[in-house]
Image (cartoon, helix red, strand yellow):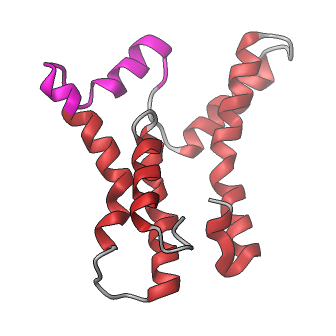
Amino acid sequence: MARRDLWWWSALAAFAAALPRNEGVLLVVPLAFEDWRRHGLCWHPRAPALLGATAGLLGYMGYLQAVGKGAFDFMKAEGLGWGRITVTSWRSLHAALSVLYHNPMHSLAFTYTFIELASAVRPGVGCLVIVGLGDRWSDVV
């Protein structure tokens, strides 16, 4: 949509992506890159559309605050309910390799940890893909 100069539709899609998962905010990066690649560094009416993903997350956080919860309670719920916490990629990689080494392949811990390992390795693979694709990397992201 961004490549067709449908910036408000791009913003709406990014907004929708950031509502269920806070990682959707990262869509700002490929949208900004696409805008820069097509139009350079200048202010224009479509620039606010780049903040669609940010508005999705902030909207959800505002909703949580409005209904009497804390704006960051979704992060606490992930930690308490699912045992998930936000950590750096290298910490996640270390924990994953440790669990994979000490648990059999058919165990539930192995399966969940394999998913964690894929999440830890993904940024590095993404960087290699970006370098290989040159200026068309926003296709992958």
Report the side of 125 relative to 106 (left or right): left
Q: Is residue 3 above or below residue 115?
A: below
> Whole-percent x and y of residue 44?
29, 82
Residue at x 22% of width, y 26% of height: 64
Task: Locate the C terminus and report the quarter of the image it occupies.
Answer: bottom right
Residue at x 85% of width, y 12% of height: 106
Q: In which quarter of the image is residue 56?
A: top left
Q: How many labels does the image show?
A: 0
Report the side of 115 relative to 19 (left or right): right
> Whole-percent x and y of residue 100?
77, 25
Residue at x 67% of width, y 57% of height: 124
Q: Quadrant of residue 109?
A: top right
> Whole-percent x and y of residue 36?
46, 82
> Whole-percent x and y of residue 35?
46, 77
Tell whether position 83 is magenta: yes
Q: In this view, does 88 lie above or below 108?
A: below
Q: Is residue 63 above or below residue 103?
A: below
For the record, the magenta segment spans 63-84
Task: Locate the N terminus and report the quarter of the image it occupies.
Answer: bottom right
Tell whether position 133 is magenta: no
Magenta part, dominant SS: helix
Residue at x 18% of width, y 20% of height: 69
Report the side of 52 relative to 30 (left or right): left
